[in-house]
Amino acid sequence: MSPLIIRDCPSPNHGPRKGGVAAPDLILIHYTAMQGGPNPAIKRLCDPETEVSCHYVIGESGDITRLVPDDRRAWHAGAGQWGGSDDVNSRSLGIELSNDGHSPFPAPQMDALEALLHDRMARYGIPPQGVIGHSDCAPGRKIDPGKRFDWQRLARRGLAVWPRSVPADPEAFRRHARTFGYTSSVDNETLLAAFRLRFRPGAQGPLDATDAGLAADLAHRFPA
Ligand SMILES: [Zn+2]
């Protein structure tokens, strides 16, 4: 695990966590969808005009910048739903990975992300199923961190979860996905697209037994 070196670049874009949330129980992973390394994104996330921010930005070379203290509510999730909550910002830490939305995530960046996750998950008691993508809580609206992000690598290190397909009734897909955390009210097709982006990148066609089996395993082992 890389040593955790964090530089500060304070953003004015934050507020108090709402609803009596003392510490985060979710970590949202994003990509910046910008070119030219982390600095253009950091500049944007520190601009009061944009009214967006996050807690950490990780550059391609593994440099970590903190914009908002962990105890504050950063403005990264937007409208979203997870585990029955519609104020994902109050519950979460937001981590932006510098990435144009198409390129692979370099090893130093993934190493730094893992070190940061490891530290903050231990500090706040966040379980692996609490580490999710922006696309998970905003199906149909957001696709980051995208199909190139290596969720299985995080899961192997206990920093996220990865399902195995078990026998399951396709009719129960939506209920099982909901139990895991997908409580957005989007239509079935949009929900399936978000689920596959995370757990079956590249899968096409209508809902099948594999989708149903993955959702069932997640619901049974990791209910939100
Ligand atoms: Zn995002």
Image: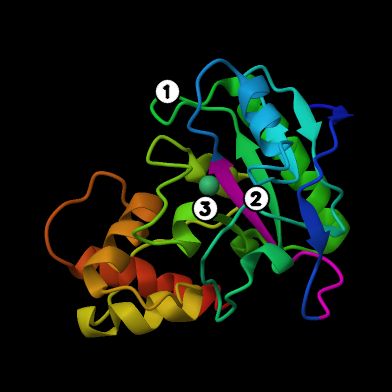
Placement of the C terminus among the 4 image quadrants? bottom right
Which residues lie in the magenta part? 20-30
Residue appearing at x 50%, y 20% in the figure? 35
- Pointer 1 local density, CA inside 10 Å: few below 14, some 14–19, many at least 20: few
Q: Which residue is mark 3?
A: 133
| Discs 2/3, front | 3
The image quadrant that residue 215 belongs to is bottom left
Query: Where's residue 68, x and y in %?
Result: 82, 46
Q: Which mark is residue 159?
A: 2
- Pointer 3 local density, CA inside 10 Å: few below 14, some 14–19, many at least 20: many
Asked whether the beta carbons under mark 2 and mark 3 sit within 8 Å of each other, the answer is: no
Residue appearing at x 55%, y 21% in the figure? 106
CA–CA distance in space, label 2 to label 1? 22 Å
Q: Which residue is mark 1?
A: 103
Q: Residue furthest left?
A: 205
CA–CA distance in space, label 3 to label 1? 17 Å
Q: Amino acid at mark 2?
A: Leu
| Discs 2/1, front | 1
Can residue 1 be seen here? The reply is no
Dot 2 or dot 1: first in sequence order is: 1
